[in-house]
Amino acid sequence: MPNIASIIKGHNKRIAATHTSKEKEACNCRKKDTCPLNGNCQASNIIYKAEVKTIDNCKTYIGLTEPPFKLRYGNHKMSLNHEKHQNATELSKHIWQLKQNNQPFTINWSIASRAKAYSNESKRCNLCLTEKLIIINTDKRTLLNKRPELISKCRHENKFYINNSSPTTKHRQENHTQLRSEHRRKAKNPNNRSDAKREYTNSRTPKKVLQTHKQNGREREYPRQNNTPTTA
Protein backbone atom coordinates (compact mmCIF):
# COMPACT_ATOMS: atom_id res chain seq x y z
CA MET A 1 0.00 0.00 0.00
CA PRO A 2 1.70 3.26 -1.09
CA ASN A 3 1.88 6.08 1.40
CA ILE A 4 0.52 9.56 0.83
CA ALA A 5 3.94 10.98 -0.10
CA SER A 6 4.43 8.53 -2.97
CA ILE A 7 0.88 9.18 -4.22
CA ILE A 8 1.46 12.94 -4.33
CA LYS A 9 4.85 12.49 -5.98
CA GLY A 10 3.38 10.24 -8.67
CA HIS A 11 0.52 12.66 -9.31
CA ASN A 12 2.88 15.62 -9.69
CA LYS A 13 5.08 13.59 -12.03
CA ARG A 14 2.14 12.80 -14.31
CA ILE A 15 1.02 16.40 -14.34
CA ALA A 16 4.53 17.62 -15.18
CA ALA A 17 4.84 15.07 -17.99
CA THR A 18 1.57 16.04 -19.68
CA HIS A 19 1.53 19.77 -19.02
CA THR A 20 2.33 22.01 -21.97
CA SER A 21 2.90 25.67 -21.31
CA LYS A 22 0.93 28.13 -23.42
CA GLU A 23 2.40 31.33 -22.01
CA LYS A 24 5.35 31.43 -24.42
CA GLU A 25 3.24 30.71 -27.49
CA ALA A 26 2.93 33.76 -29.69
CA CYS A 27 3.41 34.93 -33.23
CA ASN A 28 6.48 36.86 -34.31
CA CYS A 29 5.45 37.19 -37.95
CA ARG A 30 5.75 40.67 -39.38
CA LYS A 31 2.35 40.31 -40.99
CA LYS A 32 0.05 38.61 -38.52
CA ASP A 33 -2.51 37.73 -41.16
CA THR A 34 0.07 35.60 -43.01
CA CYS A 35 1.01 33.46 -40.00
CA PRO A 36 0.98 29.81 -41.14
CA LEU A 37 -0.51 28.61 -37.85
CA ASN A 38 -3.09 31.32 -37.18
CA GLY A 39 -1.04 33.25 -34.65
CA ASN A 40 0.58 30.23 -32.96
CA CYS A 41 3.73 29.83 -35.03
CA GLN A 42 5.88 29.82 -31.86
CA ALA A 43 4.02 26.85 -30.36
CA SER A 44 6.25 23.95 -29.31
CA ASN A 45 5.66 20.29 -28.42
CA ILE A 46 2.83 19.92 -30.91
CA ILE A 47 1.61 17.50 -33.55
CA TYR A 48 0.67 19.52 -36.62
CA LYS A 49 -1.41 18.70 -39.67
CA ALA A 50 -0.96 19.96 -43.22
CA GLU A 51 -3.93 19.65 -45.58
CA VAL A 52 -3.06 19.89 -49.27
CA LYS A 53 -6.20 20.77 -51.19
CA THR A 54 -6.55 20.55 -54.95
CA ILE A 55 -9.56 20.79 -57.21
CA ASP A 56 -10.56 17.15 -56.89
CA ASN A 57 -9.06 15.85 -53.62
CA CYS A 58 -7.44 16.65 -50.26
CA LYS A 59 -4.35 14.98 -48.81
CA THR A 60 -3.23 15.07 -45.17
CA TYR A 61 0.28 15.09 -43.75
CA ILE A 62 0.98 14.58 -40.04
CA GLY A 63 4.15 15.88 -38.41
CA LEU A 64 5.53 16.83 -35.02
CA THR A 65 7.96 19.33 -33.59
CA GLU A 66 9.51 19.80 -30.17
CA PRO A 67 11.02 23.27 -30.80
CA PRO A 68 8.79 26.12 -32.02
CA PHE A 69 6.75 25.26 -35.10
CA LYS A 70 8.24 28.11 -37.10
CA LEU A 71 11.63 26.37 -37.18
CA ARG A 72 10.05 23.23 -38.59
CA TYR A 73 7.99 25.30 -40.99
CA GLY A 74 11.19 26.85 -42.34
CA ASN A 75 12.50 23.39 -43.21
CA HIS A 76 9.25 22.59 -44.98
CA LYS A 77 9.46 25.80 -46.99
CA MET A 78 12.99 24.92 -48.13
CA SER A 79 11.90 21.47 -49.35
CA LEU A 80 8.80 22.91 -51.04
CA ASN A 81 10.64 25.70 -52.85
CA HIS A 82 13.93 24.03 -53.83
CA GLU A 83 13.72 21.06 -56.15
CA LYS A 84 16.95 19.50 -54.89
CA HIS A 85 15.21 18.92 -51.53
CA GLN A 86 12.00 17.53 -52.99
CA ASN A 87 12.54 14.09 -51.39
CA ALA A 88 12.98 15.45 -47.87
CA THR A 89 9.46 14.53 -46.70
CA GLU A 90 6.36 12.83 -48.06
CA LEU A 91 4.73 16.25 -48.13
CA SER A 92 7.42 17.72 -50.38
CA LYS A 93 7.22 14.70 -52.71
CA HIS A 94 3.49 15.24 -53.15
CA ILE A 95 3.83 19.01 -53.65
CA TRP A 96 6.49 18.65 -56.33
CA GLN A 97 4.38 16.07 -58.09
CA LEU A 98 1.56 18.59 -58.22
CA LYS A 99 3.93 21.27 -59.50
CA GLN A 100 5.19 19.02 -62.26
CA ASN A 101 1.59 18.32 -63.31
CA ASN A 102 0.74 22.05 -63.15
CA GLN A 103 -2.05 21.45 -60.64
CA PRO A 104 -3.00 24.36 -58.37
CA PHE A 105 -3.08 23.64 -54.65
CA THR A 106 -3.34 25.22 -51.23
CA ILE A 107 -1.80 24.14 -47.90
CA ASN A 108 -3.58 24.68 -44.59
CA TRP A 109 -1.60 24.18 -41.37
CA SER A 110 -3.22 23.42 -38.03
CA ILE A 111 -2.44 21.95 -34.60
CA ALA A 112 -3.73 18.39 -34.33
CA SER A 113 -2.67 17.75 -30.73
CA ARG A 114 -0.25 18.70 -27.97
CA ALA A 115 2.02 16.40 -25.99
CA LYS A 116 5.23 16.41 -24.00
CA ALA A 117 8.44 15.23 -25.62
CA TYR A 118 10.72 12.56 -24.17
CA SER A 119 11.51 13.00 -20.49
CA ASN A 120 14.40 11.34 -18.71
CA GLU A 121 12.15 10.82 -15.69
CA SER A 122 9.21 9.12 -17.38
CA LYS A 123 11.36 7.37 -20.04
CA ARG A 124 8.53 7.96 -22.49
CA CYS A 125 7.91 10.29 -25.41
CA ASN A 126 4.24 11.24 -25.51
CA LEU A 127 4.92 13.46 -28.51
CA CYS A 128 5.97 10.56 -30.76
CA LEU A 129 3.28 8.26 -29.36
CA THR A 130 0.55 10.81 -30.01
CA GLU A 131 1.75 11.39 -33.57
CA LYS A 132 1.67 7.64 -34.29
CA LEU A 133 -1.81 7.40 -32.81
CA ILE A 134 -3.08 10.20 -35.04
CA ILE A 135 -1.47 8.58 -38.10
CA ILE A 136 -3.21 5.28 -37.30
CA ASN A 137 -6.60 6.97 -36.94
CA THR A 138 -6.28 9.02 -40.15
CA ASP A 139 -7.90 7.77 -43.33
CA LYS A 140 -5.35 5.81 -45.37
CA ARG A 141 -6.80 7.07 -48.64
CA THR A 142 -5.92 10.67 -47.85
CA LEU A 143 -2.82 10.14 -45.69
CA LEU A 144 0.58 11.08 -47.13
CA ASN A 145 2.60 9.53 -44.29
CA LYS A 146 4.06 6.09 -44.82
CA ARG A 147 3.42 3.18 -42.46
CA PRO A 148 7.14 2.62 -41.62
CA GLU A 149 6.95 5.84 -39.60
CA LEU A 150 4.95 3.92 -37.00
CA ILE A 151 7.96 1.78 -36.07
CA SER A 152 10.56 4.55 -36.20
CA LYS A 153 12.66 5.16 -33.10
CA CYS A 154 12.11 8.25 -30.99
CA ARG A 155 14.84 10.79 -31.73
CA HIS A 156 14.05 13.07 -28.80
CA GLU A 157 15.90 10.88 -26.28
CA ASN A 158 19.21 11.33 -28.09
CA LYS A 159 19.89 14.57 -26.26
CA PHE A 160 19.99 12.66 -22.95
CA TYR A 161 22.85 10.40 -24.07
CA ILE A 162 26.24 11.00 -22.47
CA ASN A 163 27.87 11.67 -25.84
CA ASN A 164 25.35 14.46 -26.49
CA SER A 165 25.16 15.76 -22.94
CA SER A 166 27.14 18.98 -23.35
CA PRO A 167 29.39 20.79 -25.83
CA THR A 168 32.29 20.35 -23.39
CA THR A 169 32.08 16.57 -23.66
CA LYS A 170 32.04 16.74 -27.45
CA HIS A 171 35.02 19.12 -27.41
CA ARG A 172 37.03 16.74 -25.24
CA GLN A 173 36.22 13.78 -27.47
CA GLU A 174 37.24 15.70 -30.59
CA ASN A 175 40.54 16.74 -29.01
CA HIS A 176 41.22 13.17 -27.89
CA THR A 177 40.55 11.83 -31.38
CA GLN A 178 42.73 14.51 -32.94
CA LEU A 179 45.63 13.74 -30.60
CA ARG A 180 45.40 10.02 -31.29
CA SER A 181 45.47 10.54 -35.05
CA GLU A 182 48.42 12.92 -34.72
CA HIS A 183 50.42 10.41 -32.65
CA ARG A 184 49.72 7.67 -35.18
CA ARG A 185 50.83 9.89 -38.04
CA LYS A 186 54.10 10.75 -36.30
CA ALA A 187 54.76 7.10 -35.46
CA LYS A 188 54.41 6.07 -39.11
CA ASN A 189 56.68 8.85 -40.42
CA PRO A 190 60.41 8.16 -39.71
CA ASN A 191 61.38 11.72 -40.71
CA ASN A 192 59.88 13.04 -37.50
CA ARG A 193 62.58 11.42 -35.37
CA SER A 194 64.83 13.92 -33.68
CA ASP A 195 68.42 14.35 -34.88
CA ALA A 196 69.54 15.80 -31.59
CA LYS A 197 72.01 13.91 -29.45
CA ARG A 198 70.45 12.08 -26.58
CA GLU A 199 71.97 11.02 -23.32
CA TYR A 200 71.34 7.95 -21.29
CA THR A 201 72.40 6.63 -17.91
CA ASN A 202 74.02 3.21 -17.56
CA SER A 203 74.33 1.34 -14.30
CA ARG A 204 77.99 0.36 -15.00
CA THR A 205 79.30 3.50 -16.60
CA PRO A 206 78.61 7.17 -16.09
CA LYS A 207 76.58 9.21 -18.53
CA LYS A 208 77.71 8.79 -22.13
CA VAL A 209 76.86 10.80 -25.18
CA LEU A 210 75.44 8.92 -28.12
CA GLN A 211 76.78 9.75 -31.52
CA THR A 212 74.42 9.69 -34.47
CA HIS A 213 75.46 7.87 -37.62
CA LYS A 214 73.56 7.59 -40.84
CA GLN A 215 73.51 4.23 -42.52
CA ASN A 216 71.37 3.08 -45.45
CA GLY A 217 69.33 6.26 -45.38
CA ARG A 218 68.16 5.72 -41.78
CA GLU A 219 69.47 7.13 -38.56
CA ARG A 220 70.97 4.72 -36.07
CA GLU A 221 72.37 5.40 -32.62
CA TYR A 222 75.87 4.17 -31.59
CA PRO A 223 77.82 4.93 -28.39
CA ARG A 224 80.83 7.17 -28.96
CA GLN A 225 84.06 5.17 -29.05
CA ASN A 226 86.44 5.76 -26.17
CA ASN A 227 90.10 5.27 -27.28
CA THR A 228 91.63 6.02 -23.88
CA PRO A 229 93.77 3.03 -22.82
CA THR A 230 92.76 1.37 -19.64
CA THR A 231 95.25 0.79 -16.81
CA ALA A 232 95.71 -2.60 -15.22
Image: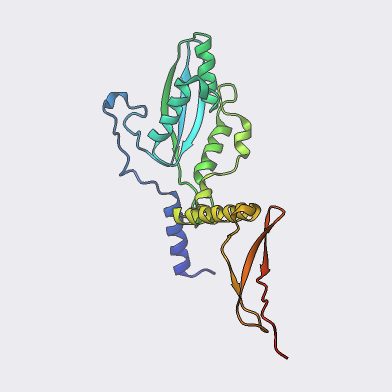
Which residue is found at the position 42% from the left and 54% from the top?
Answer: 16
Q: Nearer the viewer, residue 202 or 36?
A: 202
Q: Position of residue 190 (x, y in %)?
A: 64, 54
| Picture layout, residue 228 above or below residue 37 | below
Residue farthest bottom in this picture: 232
Q: Nearer the viewer, residue 159 or 214?
A: 214
| Picture layout, residue 88 above or below residue 180 | above
Q: Is residue 97 left or right of residue 115?
A: right
Which residue is found at the position 63% from the left and 52% from the top?
Answer: 189
Q: Position of residue 28 (x, y in %)?
A: 29, 33
Q: Where is residue 168 in the image (x, y as percent from the top left)?
A: 45, 56
| Picture layout, residue 51 above or below residue 163 | above
Q: In which quarter of the image is the C terminus?
A: bottom right
| Picture layout, residue 106 above or below residue 197 | above
Q: In this view, does 32 lie to the left or right of 152?
A: left
Q: Nearer the viewer, residue 155 or 184?
A: 184
Q: Quadrant of the N terminus?
A: bottom right
Q: Which of 142 and 1 is in front in this view?
A: 142
- Residue 30: which quarter of the image? top left
Tell me how the rendering is colored: rainbow
Q: How many marks?
A: 0
Which residue is found at the position 67% from the left and 73% from the top?
Answer: 225
Q: Where is residue 113 in the image (x, y as percent from the top left)?
A: 45, 37
- Residue 38: which quarter of the image? top left
